[in-house]
Image: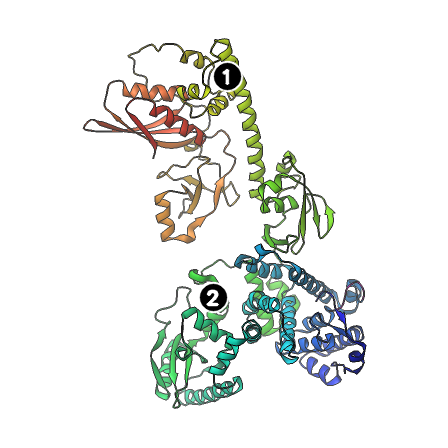
Amino acid sequence: MSSFIPAQPQSAITTQSPFTADWLARMSADLPRSQQEKLALAVRHVEPLIHGLTTPAGEPLDSHSAAVLEILQNLNADASTRICALLAVLDQKDQVKHEELKKEFGDQVATMVGGARALYHIGALAAKAHDQAATGTDQKEMKRKMLLAMAVDLRIVLVRLASRLQSLRWFVHSKTVCPYDYAKETMELYTPLANRLGIWQRKWEMEDLAFRFLQPDTYKKIAKQLEEKRAEREAFIAHIVERLIQALSEIGVDAQVNGRPKHIYSIYNKMRNKNLRFDQLYDIRALRVIVKDERSCYSTLALIHAMWTPVANEFDDYISRPKPNGYRSLHTVVADDQGRTFEIQIRTEEMHHYAEFGMAAHWHYKESGAKGGQTKVSEEEQKIAWMRQLLAWDHEESQAQADHPETTPEHIYVLTPQARVIELPYGATPVDFAYYLHTDLGHRCRGAKVDGQMVPLLTKLKTGQTVEIITTKSGGPSRDWLNPQLGFLASPRSRAKVRAWFNAVELQQRISQGQTMVEKELQRIGRTAVNLEQLAQKLGFARADDLYIAVAKDEFSLRQIENSFKAPVATETEPQTKVFDANRSSVTRTGRSGVLVVGVDSLMTQLARCCRPAPPDGISGYITKGRGVSIHRSDCKSYAGLIAAQPERAIEVDWGDTGEALYPIDLLIIASERPNLLRDISEVFARLRVNVVGVNTQSRRSLTQIVFTIEVQHGDQIQRTISALQEIPGVQAQRC
């Protein structure tokens, strides 16, 4: 609805305006005098501008706007919401500008209108896109979050939902073919939003209308099976409600009783999900009874079973046995004299409030899956709770702002040129966006367009913007991107990728430098024809590149290359077990693990002793009680058992800047007992300059098992040490 198509001149002349005096009186009857005048002013402002225009679907725009206001009035929306619904359909460029709205209707209305126009724009953009990657479940949820994030005031979302509902009604009334994508978008995007806002009547209606266009044959089949119209079912419910209220008053139980007939899409959904036939559904008609205390719940249950016939095996006591999410209620199914079944839920006021607004809220429970609604309350959910209060009690703006102050969002939602929604941390830049899409795209990023305009790479993105990355054919990132003061990167994930690129470049430089030094040494001693790979393995390295790196970092003396070609001299002296005392910092002594917990390096962490992780091992975090975050290797069996028992304690971790830190790891050596075994093993540790901090020896029969606790800086040292140990005759080495 970002633009509107002029109607035919003949229809524009003959069509009577829906903005009649009687209509305006009904739309403003529940508003204070001052707000009534503002609504009337908005009507006078809008009416001549939209006369003769239609929506993209072909519906007269004035009729559409009038009907949307009726929906909002039935929801008890405030005056600002109703005025926003009228003014948001006007084209900002040609018809009305923000400053004009601010002057006439105030800053609040002007801001809401701007937000509503932004939502219309995003909707139009998404409708034109054909990105297959944007059709998944995650993308649907992303779009919902983006709509909520873009709405500076959630009443804007309410306006959008009312507009969508009216369009669906018009398709049915005018017998116009509804586009399949339009109905699908309604089902996937808008009905979940209506569910979360608690406007269930409108949500049910949108679901039924969209389902009618998506699967017309199934819709007609279920409607025929109902055998009675919705109006007849509603009359039946009303009769049962009246009868039950009278019976409860006679026994002295103060209760609220309400009911609803199950809508067609809900019937279809339940039949599909639970693989049931239509005759196996007992909650096509349903009632809810709310009483003061638990004792009254069971008294009401006894009365209901006395008035109607209970259906066998259709009773659930969630009061004595609550659901995992804390939901409590009594559920029973009964049948009247004519065999018509209906479900009755009985709960206290406290149980009802928890079911509607707490962690057991209907939408929360349904969308949380196996977790049963046990999730952390997010900023979006806090805003939704505020919105539902606004709908229920119409709080004053000042009070609402005092109770729910604005907070900085944690995430933003931007679009690719194909309308795929991307979630980024707050403050993200186009460079963060590029790295999120693909690492190579981030490396080659040289410019960006936001909403079609060239912007600097350090521009902070906002929700709803469309970002396009301009790349070069080859190249890499800039070191300036790692400077936090310049603000090129806001995501730890992106900084890690840039750092990894420079580490790879530095590694290649060290390999080239080390290779040059080794070749010069071999030329000096006259061994130029030697196989470098075999020489590296002879010196205790897995590959020649590892030898080059050690030489370049001055961790391996070139003199040892010369000595490797000399005959070994036997010695009977047993060297001490602790062969190398590193001057570098040890994780065991300093407690600095270099692990980032969700991008933060200041949180308390400890390396698990069961698996002893070390860079670059894949690692996972487990939140302990009072001892910070325990860091395990991702393949650790102990960690798998802990997470299986308590999955909510898992947390994302990664290696940060480990510097020159040394990490303790355990090596298991199995060897046949023989003289000088310890001497041979110690010589390997001495040659590789490995620090041994612990030894545990066990002997059984002719085999010796030795567990060495050594300190290493990175995983390459582990593999190099194991390879060197396995070259000792009769020795098998592996990491514990």
Q: On the rendered image, what quadrant is the N terminus found in?
A: bottom right
Horizontally, residue 313 falls left or right of residue 511, namely left
Percent x, y of residue 466: 67, 53
Choose top left, top right, bottom left or bottom right for residue 249: bottom left
- Tell me the mark number nearer the camera, choosing from 1 and 2: 1
In percent of the image, x 55 and y 27: which residue is there? 508
- Magenta region, mostly helix, strand or loop? loop
- Give the SS element for disc 1: helix
Percent x, y of residue 350: 45, 72
Q: Inspect the magenta stretch and tell me whether residue 60 lies in it.
A: no
Specify few, some or many for label 1: CA neighbours under 10 Å numbering under 14, 14-19, or 20 or more.
Answer: some
Q: CA distance from mark 1 to mark 2?
A: 65 Å
Q: Nearer the viewer, residue 427 or 249?
A: 427
Q: Is residue 655 above or below residue 47?
A: above
Percent x, y of residue 324: 39, 64
In percent of the image, x 37 and y 87: which residue is there? 308
Q: On the rendered image, what quadrant is the C terminus found in?
A: top left
- Residue 628 visible in the picture: no
Q: Which residue is mark 1?
A: 518
* First in residue order: circle 1 vs circle 2: 2
Q: Which residues are magenta?
A: 90-94
Scheme of colours in the image: rainbow
Q: Inspect the magenta stretch and tell me whether residue 93 lies in it.
A: yes
Horizontally, residue 668 falls left or right of residue 156, namely left
Choose top left, top right, bottom left or bottom right for residue 715: top left
Amino acid carrying label 1: it is Val
Q: Is residue 675 above or below residue 695?
A: above
Amino acid carrying label 2: it is Lys
Q: Which residue is mark 2?
A: 366
Q: Nearer the viewer, residue 317 or 514?
A: 514
